[in-house]
Amino acid sequence: MTMVERYPIRTRILHWLTAALVFSALFVGFVMVNSLGSYGALVGVHMTLGVLILLIVVVRAANRFTHRTPRLPDTVGSVEHALVVGSEIGLYALMLAQPLIGWAMVSAAGRPVVVFGSFALPRIAPFDADVYFVLRQTHSVLAYLLVAAIAAHVSAVLLHTLTLRDRMLSRMTFGTRRG
């Protein structure tokens, strides 16, 4: 088995931090819309997670588009390579759009976006019920698209790692390198 070229440590940290935050925000969001008693507290947590995701993904995108990525394993053909690049761009777009749509949605509802318990962000959309409705629907659709994109991403990595045995997952993990 050949040595696998890994992503730099900063990229791996940003990747797993993003994964944890996105998973948490999606989980809190899905629980929040089905909760009555804890709705207010969950909204605050959800908005804070969204802003953190937005900040981390901006840093991550800057890191990604200013540094080369490791070469993909030989098991990745040209068509699959194009799918990898396209899905990566799609994931970045979703992770940037989702918190911005959420922020605009709350702004359109006439409520402040409060993060970290007390820090209010400025409005980025006018107070308007029709705009709120469109943004609310868009936020929900993007959440489901994000879940589907993440499921496809994880499935592809597991297919390569478990079936093709090309150690795709080890490119983004921590620990000792094995040949």
Image (tube, rainbow, N blue to C red):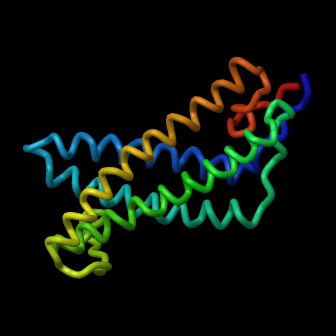
In the drawing, does residue 56 fall left or right of residue 43?
Answer: right
Quadrant in which the N terminus is drawn: top right
Q: Is residue 131 above or below residue 157?
A: below
Instruction: Tell which of 104 and 172 is nearer to you.
Output: 104
Residue drawn 42% across and 46% down? Answer: 145
Residue drawn 17% across and 71% down? Answer: 130
Residue drawn 81% across and 36% down? Answer: 77
Q: Residue furthest front?
A: 79
Query: How many discs mark residues in the rendered view?
Result: 0
Residue drawn 37% across and 55% down? Answer: 49
Quadrant in which the C terminus is drawn: top right
Instruction: Tell which of 22 and 78 is nearer to you.
Output: 78
In the drawing, does residue 108 fall left or right of residue 6?
Answer: left
Q: Residue furthest right?
A: 2
Q: Is residue 54 above or below residue 85?
A: below
Residue 75, by quadrant, is: top right
Picture coordinates of residue 155 (x, y %)? 58, 29
Instruction: Tell which of 14 and 79 is nearer to you.
Output: 79
In the drawing, does residue 105 fall left or right of residue 1?
Answer: left
Picture coordinates of residue 163 (x, y %)? 71, 18
Picture coordinates of residue 106 (x, y %)? 23, 68
